């Protein structure tokens, strides 16, 4: 946010002349009223309004949108009623509208100029890209006794710089020494207030982004407006003159020949975008010829790559399923082993016998804990080894058969360890498949076949 403010009315002549001019044109309410004009007090509240019936016209904002304006008579100083604030969707960068600037003037300063029409701005000698036209600046004169340093210190706390404007009294356009407060950052398109009266008596009821410098109409395709109203290419767009480096083009060609045609997305189809595509196409052709590839070969590679993408997606889903079940088994196996070790050695019974005892009404807490732990382990095992990740009856029965082969605590440890090895194999399979798929991208097949994945049972060792 950048601001400039006004000079001090050190001798009081400006305020005196302003008061005389207002009094000379004042109506019975004590305010200057032109035909169809409106006046505001220091708090931007409407205090008087002309009786002329207004007319309405559409005005282009310069970004493709339009504003409806109320056209009336009368001139005089600008007054602002409502503005679009900093950080709003229409104005994402930190900028101030003329309305907000007028509401925060310190030290009893008088706003002498606010939003201007382009015609009035030219009439008073304003620069074509004046922020007054854009609705993001005001001019202020302060009472006698207010120093320039006070004004600078006030706005310095808000991160703004202050510029004192000294004007030649002999200049017919001169408005006297003043501070110019500019509320828009230099590189941002300013936002006019949602409703304001400019110096020519035209009331803008609503508007969107304005363009400094008198720019009008939407930006051409591939371009955007800069803060000064001039055009610049959109970075990476079709009009961006930035060229691909030979290294980038060659890398993109390699990616394309491997089957990934999405590499050409985002290059655009404009003048410069077409040149970038042609550059990549040339690199693709050069590399394909060097590898002895024909157009048919490239098309086949595209189909292969699409299959790899689909297979990667399927194996990714399966990997997530088995990883969850395997991790759960890591936590449940120690519980089952601990429950087995807690049973008396002399009275230890196989899993099937334990289940039957519990079902027949045996009220042994240790035996019930053992049965429950085995059921949880059986369900987790069935999910891990199932191709779909959903436990099947066959997988559950297989787990129970394995557990029933244990005749004592030592053999139970061995059986549980074997179940963990089977889960480890199920866990490693999707990873090996994904490695093989990735090695096969571009037709350069190299079987994976890595070392089997190991699961470590946490916390319990066989006795």
Image (cartoon, grey):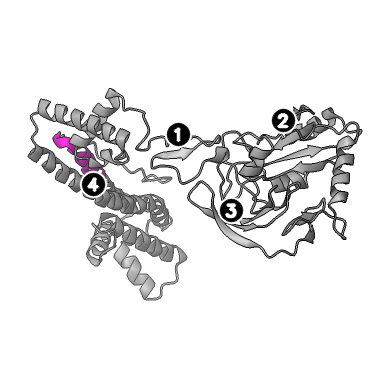
Rendered location of residue 82, percent (x, y): 69, 54
Residue 347, can we see it? no
Q: Is residue 431 magenta?
A: yes
Up the image or down, 184 lies above or below 357; here it is above
**Eye-nearest disc, 4 or 2:** 2
Sequence-first tag of 3 and 2: 2
**CA neighbours of label 2 inside 10 A, class few (<14), some (14 to 19), many (20+):** some
Query: In 3D space, how far apart are the residues under numbered discs 4 and 1 (Cα atoms)?
Result: 39 Å
- Assign a secondary structure to mark 3: loop
Query: In 3D space, how far apart are the residues under numbered discs 3 and 4 (Cα atoms)?
Result: 49 Å
The residue wearing badge 4 is 309
Residue 226, can we see it? yes
Sequence-first tag of 4 and 2: 2
The residue wearing badge 2 is 161
- Residues drawn in magenta: 430-445
**Eye-nearest disc, 3 or 4:** 3
The residue wearing badge 1 is 232
- Assign a secondary structure to mark 4: helix
Sequence-first tag of 2 and 1: 2
- Assign a secondary structure to mark 2: loop
**Eye-nearest disc, 4 or 1:** 1
Main SS type for the magenta part? helix
């Amino acid at each position: 946010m950048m601001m400039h403010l006004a000079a001090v009315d050190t001798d009081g002549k400006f305020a005196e002349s302003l008061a005389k001019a207002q009094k000379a044109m004042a109506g019975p309410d004590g305010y200057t009223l032109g035909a169809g004009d409106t006046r505001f007090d220091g708090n931007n509240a409407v205090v008087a309004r002309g009786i002329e019936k207004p007319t309405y016209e559409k005005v282009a904002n310069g970004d493709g949108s339009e504003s409806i304006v109320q056209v009336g008579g009368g001139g005089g100083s600008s007054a602002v009623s409502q503005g679009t604030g900093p950080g709003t969707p229409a104005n994402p960068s930190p900028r101030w509208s003329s309305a907000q600037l007028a509401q925060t003037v310190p030290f009893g300063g008088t706003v002498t100029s606010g939003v201007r029409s382009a015609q009035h701005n030219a009439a008073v000698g304003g620069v074509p890209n004046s922020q007054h036209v854009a609705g993001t600046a005001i001019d202020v004169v302060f009472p006698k006794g207010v120093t320039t340093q006070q004004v600078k210190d006030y706005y310095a706390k808000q991160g703004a710089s202050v510029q004192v404007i000294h004007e030649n009294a002999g200049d017919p356009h001169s408005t006297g020494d003043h501070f110019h407060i500019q509320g828009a950052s230099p590189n941002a398109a300013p936002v006019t207030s949602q409703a304001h009266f400019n110096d020519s008596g035209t009331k803008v009821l609503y508007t969107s982004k304005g363009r400094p410098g008198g720019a009008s109409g939407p930006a051409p395709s591939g371009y955007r407006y800069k803060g000064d109203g001039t055009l610049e290419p959109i970075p990476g767009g079709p009009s961006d003159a930035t060229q691909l480096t030979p290294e980038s083009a060659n890398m993109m060609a390699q990616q394309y020949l491997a089957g990934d045609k999405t590499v050409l997305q985002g290059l655009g189809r404009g003048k410069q975008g077409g040149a970038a595509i042609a550059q990549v196409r040339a690199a693709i052709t050069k590399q394909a010829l060097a590898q002895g590839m024909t157009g048919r070969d490239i098309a086949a590679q595209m189909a292969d790559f699409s299959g790899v993408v689909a297979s990667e997606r399927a194996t990714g889903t399966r990997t997530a399923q088995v990883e969850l079940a395997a991790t759960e088994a890591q936590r449940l196996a120690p519980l089952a082993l601990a429950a087995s070790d807690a049973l008396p050695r002399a009275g230890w019974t196989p899993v099937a016998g334990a289940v039957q005892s519990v079902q027949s009404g045996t009220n042994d807490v240790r035996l019930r804990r053992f049965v429950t732990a085995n059921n949880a382990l059986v369900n987790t095992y069935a999910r891990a080894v199932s191709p779909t990740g959903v436990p099947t009856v066959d997988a559950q029965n297989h787990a129970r058969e394995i557990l029933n082969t244990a005749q004592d605590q030592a053999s139970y440890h061995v059986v549980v360890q074997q179940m963990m090895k089977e889960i480890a194999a199920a866990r490693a399979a999707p990873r090996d498949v994904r490695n093989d798929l990735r090695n096969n991208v571009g037709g350069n097949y190299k079987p994976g076949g890595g070392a089997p994945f190991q699961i470590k049972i946490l916390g319990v060792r066989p006795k």
